[in-house]
Amino acid sequence: DAKTTQPNSMESNEEEPVHLPCNHSTISGTDYIHWYRQLPSQGPEYVIHGLTSNVNNRMASLAIAEDRKSSTLILHRATLRDAAVYYCILSRIGNQFYFGTGTSLTVIP
Amino acid sequence: NAGVTQTPKFRILKIGQSMTLQCAQDMNHNYMYWYRQDPGMGLKLIYYSVGAGITDKGEVPNGYNVSRSTTEDFPLRLELAAPSQTSVYFCASSSPGEQFFGPGTRLTVL
């Protein structure tokens, strides 16, 4: 199963953009890149996913490197409610997820 | 839609006891999953199901059993509880591209 590497923790000031990196050098051609986040004492929630092209939704943007060996989750304006653990996961659609330890994001008021 | 529901929210078991964690979804998803999350760690997949009557092992299946008799329900059974099974358990179901998680069951085995 393809693995991902993320920094353990990051900090951001409120209302500033946040770029959360993820390395996945062993990604295969059919692996999608998924991002989930987990707020304290809650189950993970979907943020965004993509295959090759950059993706945008109301929560975030996903920038995927041309060689697909890395990606970046972009929160355009961090709020205190964005403080969470962010997981970058590789999976084929419909297949099981393998979570790493994620990046713990702290948002500073 | 209630989404994914789990019961109970909390449970304390004695070593050797058994229990069933309940999970139900009302989104008509074929795929369902059970994860456990130990403190400070990411989620680990216990079992998953691709449809009624079909289940398969994940990363950490030892000490657990599952069944899937309907699309909606996916219970997780602990037969002989051990302290190592103290964890938070999350159930999830998925549509193509997105998994929906329940609120979790916090289990302590003493």
Image (tube, rainbow, N blue to C red):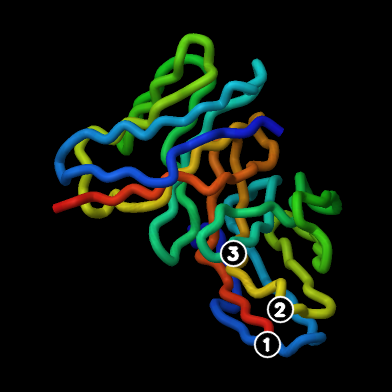
- State whether discs 1 and 2 lie on one chain: yes
Real-space CA distance between mark 2 and mark 3, rounded to the nearest whole angstrom: 12 Å
The chain carrying label 2 is: B
Say if A86 sits above or below A75 in the image. below
Say if B52 sits above or below A13 in the image. below
Secondary structure at badge 1 equals loop
> Residue B89 is drawn in which quadrant?
bottom right
| Residue B38 numbered tag | 3
Q: Are marks 1 and 2 in contact (CB under 8 Å)?
A: yes
Left or right: B87, with B83 as reference point: left
Residue on which the image places disc 2: B83
Which amino acid, mark 3? Answer: Asp
Which amino acid, mark 1? Answer: Leu
Q: Residue at x 53, y 11 (%)?
A: A67
| Residue B110 numbered tag | 1
Which amino acid, mark 2? Answer: Pro
> Residue A20 is drawn in which quadrant?
top left
Q: State the count of labels.
A: 3
Q: Residue at x 70, y 46 (%)?
A: B30
